[in-house]
């Protein structure tokens, strides 16, 4: 059996997955996508029995996934779920279509529309994000109209993708959010992510603190709905909580779990390795 792993940065997660596969006597071919040169007429790479996509860069991830899949090979996560989870607007649209609870969210395509929405739909307080991106980069909590004006003006000078105004209500009544991990439609672990110091963001990549989360039936049902909407794969689901219930904020299709494993005691790399092996046998 042979598994290929596509990556662009060899993080703790990739090394841990590699070890879990090797402990199971699986041959692993490591493919750094930054070194690949893809022949679009005929595949010039052997991807083995199944591929695992672990590239952090969304566009490298998406395009190399397309190559693997359209040259007749199987890859986790697949092309369709990669497109959706890599774009916050697409993810939110899918979740809403499947009746999965989401925060109030508006998308606008001009400064005028954005500022009008900020004032009328969000009463002058909201979070604005780029539709693509991770690790909390370029996410802004806007507490007044003048801050919204400044951010929208800066975006006028950025790449057109960043001129798409994705705006959400701010939900953080408990100073934390939830990250739930799914492997092949199975909820395997979860953590609370608490904000660090004065930062309002809870991302563990920015110093947020991880604590184990007890998976309730309600949380499991929400995560199951997300997984079924996207199809089988490996996902990190971000959930916001308030007195009105839970809301799915984002879905990460290339999730990190370095801080989750010690916090929960769940060996996520082993689950991923077993999933890959089961798929490779099909």
Image (cartoon, helix red, strand yellow):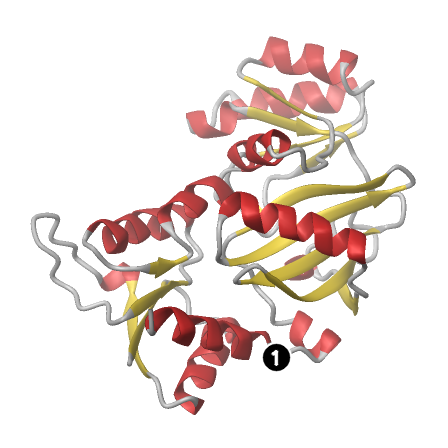
Q: Nearer the viewer, residue 53 or 146?
A: 53
Residue 165 lies, in percent from the top left, at: 58, 24
Q: Residue at x 73, y 24 (%)?
A: 147
Q: Position of residue 278 (x, y in %)?
A: 41, 73
| Residue 62 to residue 254: above or below | above
Instruction: Judge by depth and name the residue closer to the eye, 249 or 272.
Output: 272
Give the quarter of the image for residue 211: bottom right
**Horizontal and vertical percent position of residue 81:** 45, 46
Q: Residue furthest left?
A: 41
Please state, as top left, top right, bottom left or bottom right, where the C terminus lies in the image.
Answer: bottom left
Q: Which residue is mark 1?
A: 267
On the question of residue 6 being in view, the answer is: no
Question: Is the residue 218 above or below the residue 162 in the image?
Answer: below
User: Which residue reaches farthest right?
Assistant: 243
Q: Which sits in the foreground, 106 or 10? A: 106
Quadrant in which residue 129 is drawn: top right
């Amino acid at each position: 059996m042979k598994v290929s792993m596509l990556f662009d940065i060899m993080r703790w997660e990739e090394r841990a997955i590699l070890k879990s596969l090797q402990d199971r006597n699986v041959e692993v071919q490591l493919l750094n996508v930054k070194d690949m040169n893809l022949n679009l007429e005929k595949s010039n790479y052997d991807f083995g029995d199944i591929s695992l996509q672990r590239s952090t860069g969304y566009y490298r991830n998406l395009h190399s996934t397309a190559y693997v899949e359209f040259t007749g090979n199987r890859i986790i996560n697949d092309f369709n779920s990669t497109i959706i989870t890599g774009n916050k607007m697409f993810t939110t649209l899918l979740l809403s279509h499947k009746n999965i609870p989401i925060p109030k969210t508006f998308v606008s395509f001009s400064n005028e529309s954005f500022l009008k929405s900020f004032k009328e739909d969000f009463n002058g307080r909201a979070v604005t994000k780029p539709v693509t991106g991770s690790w909390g980069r370029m996410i802004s909590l806007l507490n007044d109209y003048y801050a919204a004006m400044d951010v929208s003006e800066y975006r006028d000078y950025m790449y057109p993708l960043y001129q798409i105004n994705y705006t959400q209500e701010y939900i953080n009544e408990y100073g934390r959010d939830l990250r739930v991990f799914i492997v092949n439609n199975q909820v395997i672990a979860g953590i609370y992510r608490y904000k660090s110091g004065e930062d309002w963001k809870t991302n563990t990549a920015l110093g947020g603190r991880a604590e184990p989360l007890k998976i309730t039936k309600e949380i499991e049902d929400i995560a199951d709905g997300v997984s079924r909407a996207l199809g089988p794969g490996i996902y990190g689901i971000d959930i916001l909580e308030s007195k009105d219930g839970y809301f799915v904020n984002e879905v990460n299709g290339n999730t990190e779990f370095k801080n989750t494993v010690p916090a929960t005691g769940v060996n996520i790399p082993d689950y991923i390795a077993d999933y890959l092996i089961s798929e490779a046998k099909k």
